[in-house]
Image (tube, grey):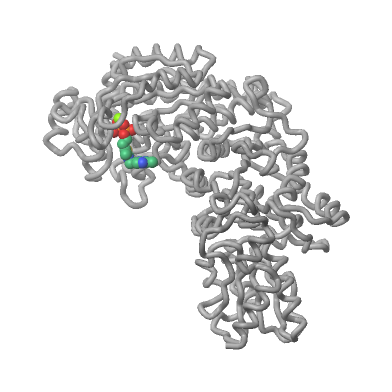
Amino acid sequence: MQPTQRRLANAIRALAMDAVEAANSGHPGMPMGMADAATALFTKHLKFDPSDPRWPDRDRFVLSAGHGSMLLYALLYLTGYAQPTLDDIKRFRQLGSPCAGHPENFEMPGVEVTTGPLGQGLAMAVGMAIAERHLNAVYGDELVDHRTFVVAGDGCLMEGINHEAVGLAGHLKLGRLIVLWDDNNITIDGSTELSRNEDVVARFRAAQWHTVECDGLDAGKVSKAIVQATADPRPSLIRCKTIIGYGAPHKQGTAATHGSPLGAEEVAAARKELGWTDPPFVIPNDLLSAWRNFGSRGAGARAEWQKRLDASGKKDEFLARIAGQVDDSWLKPYLDKLLGELKPVATRKASEMALEAINAAIPSTIGGSADLTGSNNTKTKTLEPLTPDNYGGRYIYYGIREFGMSAAMNGMALHGGVIPYGGTFLVFTDYARPAIRLSALQRARVIYVMTHDSIGLGEDGPTHQPIEHLQSLRAMPQIEVYRPCDAVETAECWALALQSQEPSILALTRQNLTPLRTKASNENLCARGAYRLKSAGNARKIILLATGSEVEIALGAADRLEQQGIGADVVSMPSTERFDAQPAESREDILPDVSNREILRVSVEAGTTVGWERYTGPHGLRIGIDRFGGSAPASDAYDFFGITPEKVASKILERLKI
Ligand SMILES: Cc1ncc(C[n+]2csc(CCOP(=O)(O)OP(=O)(O)O)c2C)c(N)n1
Ligand SMILES: [Mg+2]
């Protein structure tokens, strides 16, 4: 006899309770409350095949309420994914177990995205739904035809990011996005009445979503709601009325079940309440095989899909694209042409010029900007807007939604088949930062085009002038920050960003810069992170290290020093992280022994000097800006802050006198 949906769901409840008990930490409430809804989704609707977790046309499932990670681990185990094993679940939250406290996309293939920072899962799902529609437009229903399902909690729907994500999804009419809201009226502090009185459903409706409400504890009713959501052309919110910790007789419906083990006594009482007679971590055979049967439900669909792929003339192209391969054959011809017609340009403009070549050569790029298209220079001539009428377009008007844009780009990159890049002002990386951090953590290939990268943006003043941003972004692991000094470096940095499996940030100027790399090189010099642009003419006394717009200033200062017989190297350092990763001999060649007091090392960057002692040594000279900027034309601002060739040279001469 087929087990009831409730009994299937109780397997999730039991695993969640037991794993949290064993770990003595974790969140049993959410998995227990949403077990029935998740059972409905996974046994009847979600298109997936555990034997091929990376099947490109699978539905995507995003547990935005990442604290309920045991819900996902239980589902993956029960439906028959190779990971997690029951042993992995027994070691929930322990070092080395793929069942980390919150779901991590790099731990096992069944986990699509890393979630836990509330709201971001939902916002990444929007990006996945965009990628799906785009690839559907390119490859048709035969190859790309899937949905994105999200489980979101009250927290996800309170965070500011949800407004950006919901607005964007409604605008783009992402009808294949379906959000199940775990409406349990509870957050950590207690009742949601403590902090919310908005009509969430009305808000989604106002954002042009379809909404439907159901008893989230009744799998049959959830299933009906999913059918309605699937049929509606708009993105859907399913309000699942649930009880947190459902099944734990004394604690259910309270915040006590949110983030702590229930305790042995309450677990025993819950077992009784749920009619669950098996010991911890034991799923009776009939139940496990029923779950496994549901897990194999999608195998036929995958086999059919495989046939269509094999018959498709686009098979190789499609697979290469899904694998994320890009070729950089655009770079050399582009550089050859560029070197033939050098003129001063801002690096944001140089980025646009490179993008003209990149977007023509690499069809998987999808550009965009958070309402600064004309400033970020992110839209190249042939890119059409991606709209509900033309999902095949490759340019997204994200609106003034830096965080939403960045999270959506994470979702697009993780979906696969597209390489998202998007722009705003560098200073507004602060608005996008939580998503940038998740790009890095998840190793999502997102390329951030961050323009107006210093006081050089001029008159908009200190609110718009980044100071601490470059260094704080460099401090983030697993993301490359590039600050190119001219058009050639900009193209090289773009090539590196596209080839990387990690996210990148391009920090680009508003103001024009003199071409400094004027000769062809067979090597991408930016790949070294730092290289000698000019060698000392006289005996070397100085090494100037500079990035971006300050490289030409450093060269001007070096000229002045050389005129006085003081030899000065100028090193362009577009990426400190790449430099750090070079072999010791290469680093030593650029920056010999820090303790050598014969050579003064000088850093020049129009931002905080914090961190530059890493390269100048404690006795070096750090020229930068350790205060907020000022509203003035760029050249006046540079003069005021002492970052001109004359002033840099005179600071160095002063130091040499000591
Ligand atoms: C951005 C962010 N802020 C705070 C937290 C800490 N936190 C985790 S769960 C939670 C409460 C979430 O409430 P809800 O989504 O209703 O989950 P439930 O208690 O119903 O499981 C909070 C504040 C977080 N994970 N992410
Ligand atoms: Mg809640």
Residue 540 figure quarter: bottom right
292 over 648 or under it: above or below: above
In this picture, residue 239 sits left or right of residue 262:
right
Q: Residue, x 52% and y 54% (percent of image)? A: 478
Asked if residue 69 shows in the view, the reply is yes
In the figure, is residue 593 to the left or right of 26?
right
Residue 517, placed above or below residue 622: above
Q: 160 or 37: nearer the eye?
A: 160
| Above or below, comparing residue 38 to residue 368 in the picture | above
Give the residue displayed 56% in from the left and 35% down from the top.
400
Ligand 2 sits in quadrant: top left
Quadrant for the N terminus in the image: top left
Q: Where is residue 472 drawn, in percent x and y?
A: 50, 57
Q: Residue at x 65, y 36 (%)?
A: 366
Residue toward you, 520 or 435: 435
Q: Along the line of sight, which residue is nearer the eye, 566 or 40?
A: 566
Q: Position of residue 224 (x, y in %)?
A: 39, 11
Residue 405 figure quarter? top right
Quadrant in which the C terminus is drawn: bottom right
Q: Is residue 409 above or below residue 537?
A: above
Horizontal and vertical percent position of residue 438: 48, 45
Residue 293 visible here? no
User: Quick one: 177 or 2, which is closer to the camera?
Assistant: 177
Q: Which residue is found at the position 19% from the left and 33% from the top?
A: 279
x and y percent of residue 77 in the render? 36, 33
